[in-house]
Amino acid sequence: MLGIAGLVLAVIAIVALIWRGWHMVVVSLAASLIVILANRMDVLATINSSYMGDMSAFVGSWFLLFALGSVFGRVMGDSGASAGIASSMLHLVGERHALLVIMVAGLVLSYGGISAFIIAFSVYPIAAELFERADIPKKLVVAAIMVCPATLGMVMMPGIPSTQNLIPANFLGTDAYAGALLGVICSVVMFALSYVYLQWEIGRCRRRGEHFSPSPGETLARPDGADAPPVWACFAPIVLLVVLVFVLQRAMGMQATDAVTISMLAAVIAACLLYRRRLADVRRAIGESCASGLGSLVSVASIMGFGGVVVASPAYQGIIEALMSTSLSPLWQGFITIFAIAGITGSAIGALNIYLGSMAQTLLATGLDPAMMHRVLCMASVGPATLLPHTSAMLAANQAARTEVRDTYRYVLVSCALLPILVSLLGMALGLAGVA
């Protein structure tokens, strides 16, 4: 019982310390110590193996992508390309649809196989320009950027090359397009609900007289877009990124992470060449943006270290065993168990791996459609992973936007957690009704 209380207290500590502006490394270590002491675990052994092990594994996996994503965002911003994209899109659709442009951009990039971490750095310069022109308060920018990549662009739309969408395929013998009709219906509902909600929040902010304001020390390059590169040159690196990711994965069979790394490097090189006369100091821009990206990586990786400590704790193992031994139907048991694991650890990937690793054969033996189970269980993992403010992708987005979690979390909570949970329940109902 003390161990479970420790898990709860650790989560409370994370929320409280984040709200007070403590660095994520300090927050994660403090929360990890609470879990360790409450579960009577060896402090040094657990920190060295579970905390540092999961943290270093994350850094090793994402080192290049965080650095390249940060450089890409900096080059697009300093060159005026992001301002050019914002100007052309607003000219095409009007300021009233700035939110729609950002959501579609995030969806296209996620469908191209680009992770939510990298989308945060890549889309932010464009989103900031759009928000400034449309005079939308900056506290809404993280929700606007992440709502599609973290929900329908991660687990709902069929064919998404995300890790979350591929894990069930390995265990259930399905593919990335499993449960296509179910996924399309839920994706449409999710997009519509999130768009309506965020537009409603934008309207409320305007009625309160709130305006866009850059973060302290932030300067948006060429806000009027008058000196931006030609329109084709503004879009060229992003088009290259999406197309190259698709070709490397689909035509050449390359793994998703390798394909995105190569494509991102190609996009950075293309941007530097295209905008070389517009960048005052390329060496300085690359150096500073690498440092910024890797600083963000350490913050995000530290919370992954906390997740490693939680998974290693006896209390966590007891919770999982209790959930898996319930008398509920297998699909509902899977839904609730994945929901709980994702909520505790803040990781949709971890939730799917842990549950399906031990229960996939039991699910298949029920005779239920594997494609339907694939899509429903995917959707069960994404909402609860964003319920608490320590979700890794959201931390990365706040780092990219230079915003505070306490300012942006309210909007992320609704758009990226509560609405996806409602849509996942809709998916469960449709699945049980025979829609797949």
Image (spheres, rainbow, N blue to C red):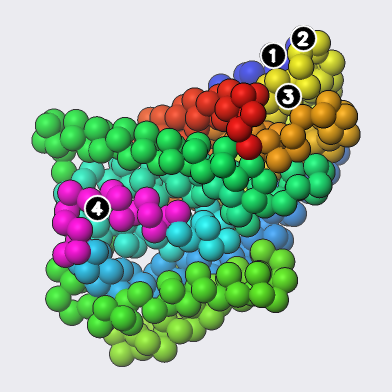
Which segment is the magenta one?
90-107
Tell me which numbered mark, 2 or 3, is placed earlier along the sequence. 2
User: Considering only vertical position in the picture, is 368 above or below 83?
Assistant: above
Give yes or no for contact between labels 2 and 1 (Cβ–Cβ under 8 Å).
Answer: yes
Asked if residue 29 shows in the view, the reply is no
Residue, disc 3: 331
Residue, disc 2: 1
| Residue 351 in magenta stretch | no
**Which amino acid is tagged 4?**
Ala
Name the residue carrying label 1. Answer: 5
Q: Quadrant of the C terminus?
A: top right
**In terms of sequence position, does the residue under pointer 4 or pointer 2 come before the other?**
2
Q: Distance of mark 3 from mark 1, alpha carbons?
A: 28 Å
Q: Which secondary structure dominates the residues rendered in magenta?
A: helix
Q: Find numbered disc 3 in the image and state the secondary structure of the residue it sits on.
A: helix
Picture layout, residue 420 above or below residue 270: above
Residue 98: numbered disc: 4
Q: Earlier in the sequence, mark 4 or mark 3?
A: 4
Residue at the image point whose x is 74% and y is 31% from the top: 310
Q: Position of residue 140 (x, y in %)?
A: 31, 42
Frontmost of labels 4 and 2 is: 4
Q: Nearer the viewer, mark 2 or mark 3?
A: 3
Q: Residue furthest front?
A: 434
Q: The residue under label 3 is which amino acid type? A: Leu
Secondary element at tag 4: helix
Q: Is residue 6 left or right of residue 203?
A: right
